[in-house]
Image: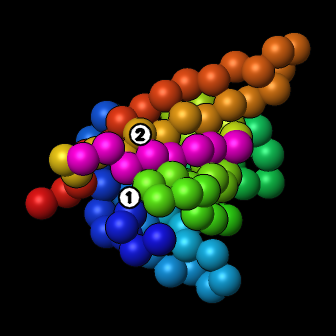
Amino acid sequence: MEAIFGEWVTPDNGLVRIGPCGEAPCGLLVDFPPPPGFTRETTRDANNRDRKKRDRKLLGIPVLWNLSSDGENGWRGRAYDPRRGLSASVSATLDPPGRLRLRGCVRVVVDMCRTEVWRRAK
């Protein structure tokens, strides 16, 4: 599991720190480019489908949780995309050198899936 521990840069230049979080590893959003008129500290989770969570700060929220090993270089868990306000089942695969391929799927009428590649921060 420790193979994916560390900091990862998302395609939108967010920074996610993956590490121990209680019983299962998680990934926390520790940096991101804020939208115009906001700072990292004032940006809220405005797109969350759960209205009760729309006032929470984005900085430090879990974007990956309940990660468990799914083989030598694979993991499964849950992911949250604050850009879309969606959470989904996710599979993650470590692709050397220093890439983490995440595939998340949400059930609408059919499974809608998206793949994103994160790179290890230096």
| Residue at the image point whose x is 81% and y is 26% from the top | 107
Residue 20 lies, in percent from the top left, at 50, 80
> Disc 2 on helix, strand or loop?
strand
Q: Is residue 44 above or below residue 59?
A: above
User: Callout 1 environment at 10 Å: few (<14), some (14 to 19), or many (20+)?
Assistant: many
**Is 1 on the left or on the right of 105, as rendered?**
left
User: Left or right: 36 with respect to 96?
Assistant: right
**Which residue carries the number 2 mark?**
101
Q: Position of residue 89 (x, y in %)?
A: 70, 43
- Given this view, does label 2 or label 1 mark the residue nearer the observer? 2
- Magenta-colored span: 89-96
Considering only order in the chain, which callout, 1 or 2, is on the residue closer to the N terminus?
A: 1
The amino acid type, in three-letter code, at marker 2 is: Arg
| Cα separation between marks 2 and 1 | 14 Å
- At 76% across and 21% down in the image, what residue appears? 111
Which class describes the residues within 10 Å of circle 2: few (<14), some (14-19), or many (20+)? some
Residue 29 visible in the displayed image: no
Nearest the viewer among 74 and 16 is 74
Residue 69 image-quadrant placement: bottom right
Query: Residue 16: which disc?
Result: 1
